[in-house]
Image (cartoon, rainbow, N blue to C red):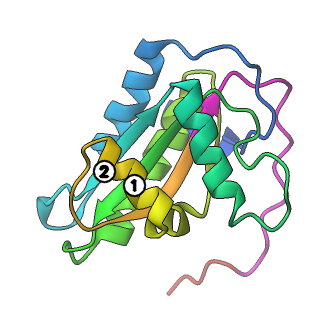
Amino acid sequence: MQNEVIKTIIERRSCKSFLPDAVDAQLIDTIIEAGLYAPNGRGLQSPIILAVTDKALRDRLEALNSKFFAKGGSPFYGAPAVLIVLADKSAPTYLYDGSLVMGNMLLAAHSLGLGSCWIHRAKQMFESEEGKQILAELGIEGDYEGIGNCVIGYPAGEPKQAAPRREGRVVKA
């Protein structure tokens, strides 16, 4: 049995090629709202979202991420928007809560016809002195850990087909 939510979950793929066009602000706001409604431990709502559409800041963050990216190249794949999830480390479930925010935003982006990809190294970015400086410049105070960078934009091509699901991953008891 399938509905639109299940269809979105099954069809979503990581996008690694984006058009340079800016993403409509209303679409970004909708994706953020979906992230803010992710389940969270104890109702603490510990994650925050840093929404970056300013090209200069986006480029600065991409350069910072590149310092921890072994492959070289553009770790944000040219996406014009980055939604960075940070979570308050004082919440006992901060890592899980932030991961659920990321998942909701990835699914919301797909449901709106946008491409998205979870880019790692947010933890390293905001543990660095440069990352801490960026947060301070933006007025973000507290003991936050970077959970993930959700890059978003209009896809420059068709998504890849899903790989077959590996057998033996479900145990029914």
Q: In front here: 157 or 148?
A: 148
Q: In front here: 168 or 18?
A: 18
124 versus 27 height, above or below: below
Amino acid type at mark 1: Gln
Question: Residue at left 55%, top 28%?
Answer: 111
Residue 127 on image: x %, y %: 45, 70
* 13 relative to 52 in the view: left or right: right
Quarter of the figure with residue 68: bottom right
Question: Residue at left 67%, top 78%?
Answer: 169
Residue 106 on image: x %, y %: 54, 42
- Dot 2 corresponds to which residue? 136
- Dot 1 corresponds to which residue? 133
Quarter of the figure with residue 164: bottom right
Q: Secondary structure at mark 1?
A: helix
Badge 1 local density, few (<14 within 10 Å), some, or many (20+)? few
Q: CA distance from mark 2 to mark 1?
A: 5 Å
